[in-house]
Amino acid sequence: MLQLYFSPMACSLASRIALMEAGVDARYHQVHLSTKTVVDADSDFRGISSKGAVPVLVLENGERLTECAAVLQYIADLNPERGLAPRPGDADRYRLQEWLSFIGAEIHKAFLFPTFWYKDDGSLAKPRARIAQTLSVPSAHLADREFLIGHSFTVADAYLTWALLLLRTAGVDIAQWPSLSAFSERMQKRPAVREAIATEMALRKMVATA
Ligand SMILES: N[C@@H](CCC(=O)N[C@@H](CS)C(=O)NCC(=O)O)C(=O)O
């Protein structure tokens, strides 16, 4: 069985959503990112991945796959009938990669990562100033579309759904982009998305009160 190393409400949430949307079972291992500990094994997470970051997907053959963009596409390809990624060879596969790269580099790493991991010593001013310009891109794109690519849910939508949830937590009011707000609400109506978020929010509360 596949195994996913995750931290509640971290970017690995997108992988959990993808697994659930794909109807693929996995064993989930929670990681404390600040201590780099695997909770169920009480072991050093860096023994699983030297990057020390989630998601890590352990494949059936024991290989470990990291990086949201790679993990999400791998999960999508496990069950192509669900249409979570355009098939390889389809021109839209590059659109998927385009969005995964944009969300990963321009929203996740450029804004969310420093916001949650760095002390605000003034160094966050520039990422904060830039985020509105960045968000105007998916906002304009989604003005007349239900999904980022084509006419159905893909793993890029899962990744953006996570990013929008965290943007709220980071103090960015996404209500100023009505198409992003509407997208976020639409995605959260999907049973798999709702269940994935509920599962991780419950785990997060347990961590907060532990
Ligand atoms: N480039 C990686 C970034 C993964 C990442 O930054 N994960 C965060 C959680 S959202 C993390 O585990 N951070 C812990 C750390 O970097 O020390 C990817 O796309 O998967």
Image: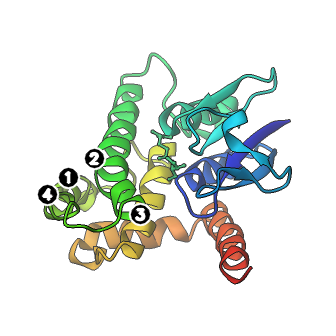
Q: Nearer the viewer, residue 79 or 151?
A: 79
The amino acid at mark 1 is Val
Q: Nearer the viewer, residue 124 or 6?
A: 124
| Residue 188: percent from left, percent from top | 53, 69
The amino acid at mark 3 is Phe
Foreground: disc 1 or disc 2: 2
Q: Circle 4 is placed at which residue position?
A: 133
User: Are the two marked residues, 1 and 3, in contact with CB atoms closer than 8 angstroms?
Assistant: no
* Gap between marks 1 and 3 measured at Cα: 23 Å
The amino acid at mark 4 is Gln
Residue lying at the far top in this picture: please name it.
89
**SS under mark 1:** helix
User: Are the two marked residues, 1 and 2, in contact with CB atoms closer than 8 angstroms?
Assistant: yes
For label 4, the crowd category at 10 Å Cα-Cα, with few meaning under 14, some 14 to 19 and many 20 or more, is: few
Foreground: disc 4 or disc 3: 3
Q: Is residue 197 left or right of residue 2?
A: left
The quadrant in which residue 50 appears is top right
Q: Is residue 68 left or right of residue 30?
A: left
For label 3, the crowd category at 10 Å Cα-Cα, with few meaning under 14, some 14 to 19 and many 20 or more, is: few
Disc ID at residue 106: 2
Disc ID at residue 116: 3
Label 3 CB less than 8 angstroms from ligand 1:
yes
Q: Circle 1 is placed at which residue position?
A: 137
The amino acid at mark 2 is Glu
Q: Earlier in the sequence, mark 1 or mark 2?
A: 2
Q: Nearer the viewer, residue 101 or 122?
A: 122
Foreground: disc 3 or disc 2: 3
- Residue 77 visible? The answer is no
| Residue 103: percent from left, percent from top | 35, 46
